[in-house]
Amino acid sequence: MTTPQELKQIVSQGLLSFPLTDFDEQGEFRADTYAARLEWLAPYGASALFAAGGTGEFFSLTQSEYSNVIRIATETCKGRVPILAGAGGATRVAIAYAQEAERLGANGILLMPHYLTEASQEGIAAHVEQVCKSLKIGVIVYNRANSKLNADMLERLADSCPNLIGFKDGVGEIENMVTIRRRLGDRFSYLGGLPTAEVYAAAYKALGVPVYSSAVFNFIPKTAMDFYRAIETNDHATTNRLLDEFFLPYLAIRNRRAGYAVSIVKAGAKLIGRSAGPVRAPLTDLTEAEMAQLDVLIKKMGAQ
C-alpha cells in the first residue's frame, strides 16, 4: 500500500491525468477497451492517473461499474503508474466508494464534490473529515462547484486528517488559492484542476502550484507531456505556440455547450482511433461539424 506521505510526494511533481471510461454504442461499460486504453497511456510518463474521475464520468457509473473500473485500473497499472480513484456524492456514499477503491488497491482518493445541496464551510469540512477518517490511504480534496473550502477550514482539516495530503483547485479564485498556498505551505500537495488546465498552467505555477491534470493527455499524450515540460522549463516559445495552435481553438469548441469539457475529450479519443464510445446522459456528444474542427486541430499536432 502507498502511504499518504508517499502519495503526496508522487503527486507533487509531474503531469497527472484522468483516463476516459469506455462505453459501447449502447452506453454499457467496456472492460476490454478500458484496459487497452490504460496500457496505451501508462508509458507516456504521467505521475499518476485518476480512474473514474470527472472526465471518467464517475457521476454516471453504477456501483458495480465503479468497482470494475477501479479493479481494472489498479490491476493494469500496478507497478507502472499509481491510480487514484474518484469518489464523491453524499458523505456515506462517498465513504462507500472510497473504501471500495481502497479495498481494490487504489493508491489514493480524489474526493469530488458532495451531491446537489449547498453547505456551510463547517459542513463541507465535516464531509471531508468523515471520508478521510474512514480510510488509511491518502486523500486529495477537489475544490469545485458546491464544495469549496477556505484556508481556515483547510487548516482545521490538516490538523484532524493526517491522510488528507492534497488540494486540487477547480475554481480559479486567485485570492483564495494564494491564501491557501501561503498559509498551508508544504502541508499539502497542490494541483491545478480547472478544465483544460494547460491554459492556466503558467499562472498557477507562479502561485506555487506547478502540477496539474491534463484532459488532452487522453488523445494527444505526447503533446500534453511536451506542454508540461515547456511549462516546467519556462520554455515560453513552446507554450505560446501550443496555446495558439491548439489549446485556444480547442477552448472555442469546448465552451459551446455545458458538459463539453468531457465530451470533447471523448471526441478526441474517437478521432485518433481509440474511441471510448459516447458520453452518457445528461452529457451530449459533439456535432459532426465540431468533430471536423477538432480533427483539424489534432492533425496539426502530428503523430502521438
Image: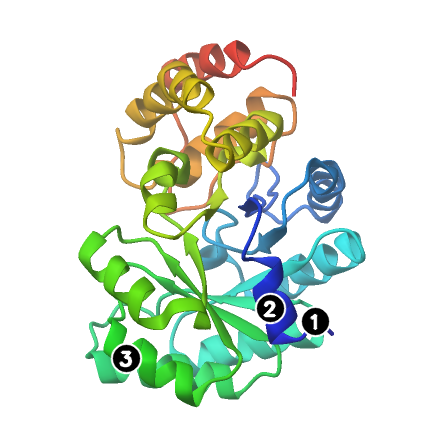
Q: Name which residue type carries label 3.
A: Met
Residue 108 tag number: 2
| SS class, disc 2 | strand
Label whose residue precedes the other's in the sequence (3 or 2): 2
Nearest-to-viewer mark from 3 and 2: 3
Evaluate if marks 1 and 2 touch, with contact meaning CB atoms under 8 Å apart.
yes
Label 3: which secondary element: helix
Q: Report the disc number at residue 153.
A: 3
State the separation of the CA atoms marked 3 and 2: 21 Å
Q: Quadrant of residue 274?
A: top right
Q: Which residue is mark 1?
A: 2
| Sequence-wise first label, 3 or 1 | 1
The residue shown at (39%, 39%) is 201
Which callout, 1 or 2, points at the residue further toward the start of the chain?
A: 1
Toward which corner of the image does residue 24 lie, by quadrant?
top right
Separation of residues labelled 3 and 1 (CA atoms): 26 Å
Q: Residues within 10 Å of mark 2 (few under 14, many from 20)?
A: many
In the picture, measured across the screen, residue 270 lies left or right of residue 197, that is: right
The quarter of the image holding the C terminus is top right
Q: Quadrant of residue 262?
A: top left
Please report the residue visible at 73 percent of the width from the left and 36 percent of the height from the top.
Answer: 40
- The answer to whether residue 7 is above or below residue 131 is above
Task: Indicate the secondary structure of the residue bearing disc 1.
Answer: loop
- Residue 124 appears in the picture as rendered: no
Residue type (three-letter) at the residue carrying disc 2: Gly
Q: Alpha-carbon neighbours of circle 1 within 10 Å: few (<14), some, or many (≥20)?
A: some
For the residues marked 1 and 2, what is the alpha-carbon distance in whole angstroms? Answer: 8 Å
Report x, y in % for residue 240: 38, 20
Whether residue 78 is visible, yes or no, is yes
